[in-house]
Image (spheres, rainbow, N blue to C red):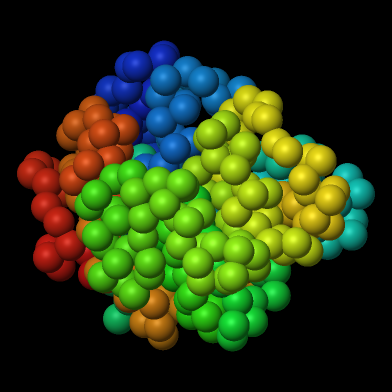
Amino acid sequence: MPAPAATMRAAIWREPGLIDLSEVELPEVPEGWALIRTAYVGLCGTDLAIFGGHHPRAAAPLIMGHEFSGIVIQSKSPGIQPADKVMAEPLITCGQCRACAEGDSHVCRNLRLYGIDYAGGLAEYVALPGDRLHVLPQDVDLRIAALAEPLAVAVHANAAVRIGADDVVAVIGGGPIGLLTAMVAQHQGAGRVAIAEPNETRRRLAQELGLDAFASVDVLDRHLKQWTDGEGADITFDCAGHPSAAARLSGLTRGRGTIVLAAVYKHPAELDLRQINFQEQILRGVRVYTRVDVQRAVGLISAGILPLDRLSLQVFGLEEINDAFAAAKNGAEAIKVLVNPSRNSGKHGTGSQDER
């Protein structure tokens, strides 16, 4: 691979509401690390929280971006070769706390992430430890590979439960995590998967994917009761993280059913704990993913098992970073907004073959 110049372009978050394009030094590549030319970076709700100054850990100046794919330019890590296509597993763990010692490093007491606590992918190049990279088949579309990190979140949420062939699954929220969670549940053999999502575009896509989709939790609740003789969903995934959803979770779910909190609440929310007691429901929190979850997500992408190419993607160049954040906040034109630092200008949808 050709050697990059000594500097690179990067989107730098300076303060709440301000991100600009700057020329910065190329990152160093210590022993055991690799230098990646960033292909696509997904923007998510965490990035929007950082941009608005609402994330509790992120500190400016910062190169954001923790969902990304790319191509290896230089490697000092065994098993990682120049020209490899890779996706990033951005977790940084301490290796010393009880969770890490017991093999549960995804809930490390001191968990940090590249793109949140340290420089991430919103730059032409990024350096990462080799053990944070997953090599992909050469024929994988790097746009789809940029979905591997949020797909791992969905895989982890589904791994928290055992889905049976007759199970009715409810998903609150049809954003990227909600749709991916529903798709994984569907793939794992759920008898019926239904989503509550007010956005018409997302709702229509869910229906095209073979999911039942309704405009509100009220309508979803009515259908759940019709399908289950008044019992409710066997498993309910909260992928919205909204107080109005929290108040409804127990009522949507059958006695001895399971509620999975896939979304991260920003503030305490009202939850009917009395009803959870009386129905002996399981309330399960989940956070990010394990390495096995990431490997499974990569495997799903590599094998083309899920119809991820049907998800509408909107791609911006790095110099359009403010437009990209505006589009991600609006959420009307695409399921996922991606930034391609290698592009010079213009935005495009899923039809582009750039950086395949």
The picture places residue 305, in percent across and down from the top left corner, at 40, 83
* Closer to us: 282 or 16: 282
Image position of 291 with respect to 31: above or below: below
Question: Whole-percent x and y of residue 22?
Answer: 28, 26
How many marks do you count on the picture? Answer: 0
Foreground residue, 340 or 274? 274
* 308 left or right of 32 in image: left
Residue 263 visible to an observer of this rendering: yes
**Screen quadrant of the C terminus:** bottom left
Q: Is residue 280 above or below residue 333?
A: below
- Residue 32, given in percent of the width and then of the height, sits at 62, 59
- Position above or below: 303 against 72: below
- Residue at 51% across / 20% down in the picture? 54
Q: Quadrant of residue 329?
A: top left
Q: 307 or 223: nearer the eye?
A: 223
Residue 297 in sight from this viewpoint: no
> Would you say 260 lies left or right of 61 here?
right
Residue placed at 55% from the left, 40% from the top? Answer: 245
The residue at the point 36 percent across, 82 percent down is 304
